[in-house]
């Protein structure tokens, strides 16, 4: 059956068609798009006009950094300007763990330059994944730092720092001290003068990229300034020679330690202050233990017979004795109650000079007991024994000076050096006062440029000090205990001392300290020096045997270095 086909004109019908009304959903969509567009535009206007400062701050927080500009710590020198402590430039390697991504080859090279294993380097990088700053290593020398920089590892940066270096090493380590890794003074004069030595760290604002690398400097907020230089009173030539002498003596005598302090009598300046054994301040791992102690200021000892010079000065000051007084020490022993004081020999009748030169315990006991104990203790106190010398050195010990003893035996033993505790510096400070006609000058660890500024205190009558000094010259005669301290061409006054070391059960008969304190020259006193040798072997332990030869060697060298003219041609 054939269907009929509509006429062609019905297919191409061009009559207008009437469309249905637009649905409500279309209007809603258009409205939403308009509101959304207006909201975006409004938000953009709001951010660019009313939140400009906030957005700028947020952007800066992600791209701008304030970084430190390191500066030099002040230099420490000796009295002639020779460097004793200087700051040398080093670098610190640090990473941003979020961007640190070295290749295996770069990791191997970096680990080798830092002295790490590759595994240790990975551990450091993974230990703090959320941080933006982690130190890998500090104190890197400049040549190694340049090799690290040449690796061009993403997330790895270098920071310039300074590290303290001590050219004289062990020779003056206990006096100068040392700093920590942040260049802050931790001991010695580095700690004492921290405020003067520390630099003013500069600050600048820099632009960084997203990996933490500096793109450019924006501006400087604070100008860096180096620390103040400090000139010490010591002479490094004498300091070095003294240290070598002490080291040699320790090896030869089998001693536990040795200490030397040398003062300029005219000014109170410390020309040398040495302790051995010492440590290397350039190796921070070595900066601990007893070798770091400045024994001249921190160790307390009983002064032994070196104190007899002060006891004699006290007796002369009482005016109960004169240089012509005679003391009968026979038979070489003296009973005080049930206690016994004795000499090595029966010296018989002695003058005051001979009491000192023979170091007679019996003689000094008889002299001392004739004078009130208050007189003796007061003289000790006036000369600074058992009290702080008020140096700025950290850890300086005061010592111990008892009240005037009531018991005669305690009075006597105090006069020949037992029952009080002093530092080596206190002993030689008292001797320097004797050499200055009884005028006490303050101790100075720094160089004094103008001696007229020194404020002295008259603590002993000048005639008493001069008489005591002249008596001490007898100690160095052939018959005296200090003859080994004689220096050819120079007249020396001094006193030996030997004390027992206190052990857990009282005085140990097998452990001793040998001491010699002296002044050279005598006619125009210049140097006052003390040598302390702790626990030498028992074959030779007397101060005249172990300490006096060191005095002779060091002081004779110092006199030559300082061009001090002879006074005993």
Image (cartoon, grey):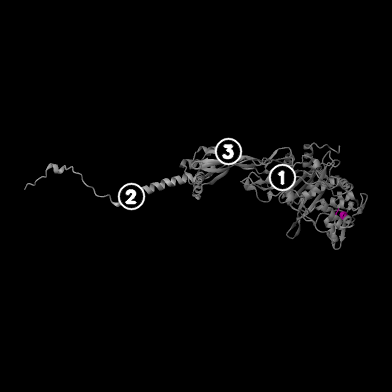
Marked residue nearer the N-terminal end (1 or 3): 3
Give x and y (percent) for residue 498: 79, 52
The crowding category of the residue bearing disc 2, from other C-alpha atoms within 10 Å (few below 14, some 14 to 19, many at least 20), is few
Residue 22 horizontal/vertical position (percent)? 27, 49
Residue visible at 9% across and 46% down in the picture: 4
Which of the numbered marks, if any, corresponds to residue 29? Answer: 2
> Between 61 and 15, which is closer to the camera in this rendering?
15
Q: Is residue 147 visible?
A: yes
User: How far, Cα to Cα, is label 3 from label 2?
Assistant: 68 Å
Please tell me whether mark 2 sits on a helix, a strand or a loop. helix
Residue 381: image location, x then y, percent: 82, 53
- Residue position marked by numbered label 3 in the rendering: 142
| Mark 3 or mark 2: whose residue is earlier in sequence | 2
Q: Which mark is residue 247?
A: 1
Mark toward the start of the polypeptide (2 vs 1): 2
Which quadrant of the figure contains the C terminus? top right
What secondary structure do most residues of the magenta stretch adopt?
Answer: helix
Residue 198: in magenta span:
no
Seen from the viewer's position, the closer of residues 219 and 353 is 219
Tag 3, which secondary structure?
helix
- Does residue 477 appear to the left or right of 150 in the view shown? right
> Magenta residues, as a range?
360-364
């Amino acid at each position: 059956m054939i269907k009929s086909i509509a006429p062609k004109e019905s297919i191409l019908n061009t009559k207008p068609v009437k469309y249905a009304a637009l649905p409500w959903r279309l209007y809603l969509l258009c409205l939403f798009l308009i509101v959304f567009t207006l909201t975006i535009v409004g938000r953009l206007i709001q951010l660019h006009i009313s939140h400009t400062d906030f957005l700028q701050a947020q952007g800066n927080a992600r791209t701008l950094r304030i970084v430190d500009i390191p500066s030099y710590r002040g230099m420490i020198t000796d009295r002639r300007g020779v460097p004793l402590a200087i700051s040398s430039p080093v670098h610190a390697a640090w990473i941003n763990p979020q961007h640190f991504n070295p290749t295996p080859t770069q990791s191997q090279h970096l680990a080798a330059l830092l002295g790490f294993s590759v595994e240790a380097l990975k551990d450091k990088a993974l230990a703090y994944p959320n941080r933006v700053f982690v130190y890998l290593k500090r104190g890197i020398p400049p040549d190694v730092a340049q090799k690290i920089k040449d690796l061009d590892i993403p997330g790895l940066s270098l920071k310039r720092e300074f590290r303290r270096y001590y050219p004289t090493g062990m020779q003056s380590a206990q006096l100068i001290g040392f700093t920590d890794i942040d260049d802050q003074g931790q001991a010695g004069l580095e700690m004492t003068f921290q405020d003067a030595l520390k630099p003013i760290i500069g600050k600048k604002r820099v632009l960084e990229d997203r990996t933490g690398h500096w793109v450019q400097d924006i501006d400087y907020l604070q100008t860096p300034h180096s620390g103040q230089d400090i000139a010490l009173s010591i002479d490094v030539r004498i300091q070095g020679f003294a240290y070598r002498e002490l080291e040699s003596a320790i090896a030869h005598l089998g001693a536990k330690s040795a200490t030397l302090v040398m003062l300029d009598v005219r000014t109170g300046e410390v020309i040398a202050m040495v302790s051995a054994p010492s440590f290397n301040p350039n190796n921070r791992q070595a900066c601990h233990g007893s070798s770091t102690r400045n024994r001249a200021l921190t160790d307390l000892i009983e002064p032994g017979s070196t104190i007899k010079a002060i006891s004699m000065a006290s007796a002369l000051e009482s005016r109960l004795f004169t240089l012509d007084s005679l003391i009968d020490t026979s038979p070489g022993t003296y009973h005080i109650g049930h206690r016994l004081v004795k000499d090595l020999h029966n010296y018989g009748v002695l003058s005051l000079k001979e009491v000192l030169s023979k170091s007679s315990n019996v003689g000094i006991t008889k002299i001392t007991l004739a004078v009130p104990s208050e007189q003796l203790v007061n003289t000790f106190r006036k000369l600074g024994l058992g009290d702080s010398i008020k140096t700025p050195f950290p850890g300086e010990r005061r010592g111990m000076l008892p009240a005037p003893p009531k018991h005669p035996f305690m009075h006597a033993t105090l006069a020949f050096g037992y029952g009080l505790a002093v530092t080596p510096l206190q002993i030689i400070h008292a001797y320097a006062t004797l050499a200055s006609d009884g005028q006490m000058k303050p101790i100075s660890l720094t160089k004094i440029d103008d001696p007229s500024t020194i404020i002295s205190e008259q603590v002993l009558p000048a005639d008493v000090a001069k008489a005591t000094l002249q008596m001490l010259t007898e100690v160095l005669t052939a018959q005296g205990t200090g003859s080994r301290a004689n220096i050819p061409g120079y007249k020396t006054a001094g006193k030996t001392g030997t004390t027992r070391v206190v052990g857990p059960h009282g005085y140990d008969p097998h452990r001793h300290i040998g001491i010699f304190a002296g002044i050279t020259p005598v006619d125009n006193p210049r140097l006052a020096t003390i040598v302390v040798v702790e626990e030498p072997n028992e074959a030779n332990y007397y101060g005249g045997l172990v300490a006096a030869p060191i005095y002779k060697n060091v002081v004779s060298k110092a006199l030559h270095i300082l061009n001090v003219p002879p006074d005993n041609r």
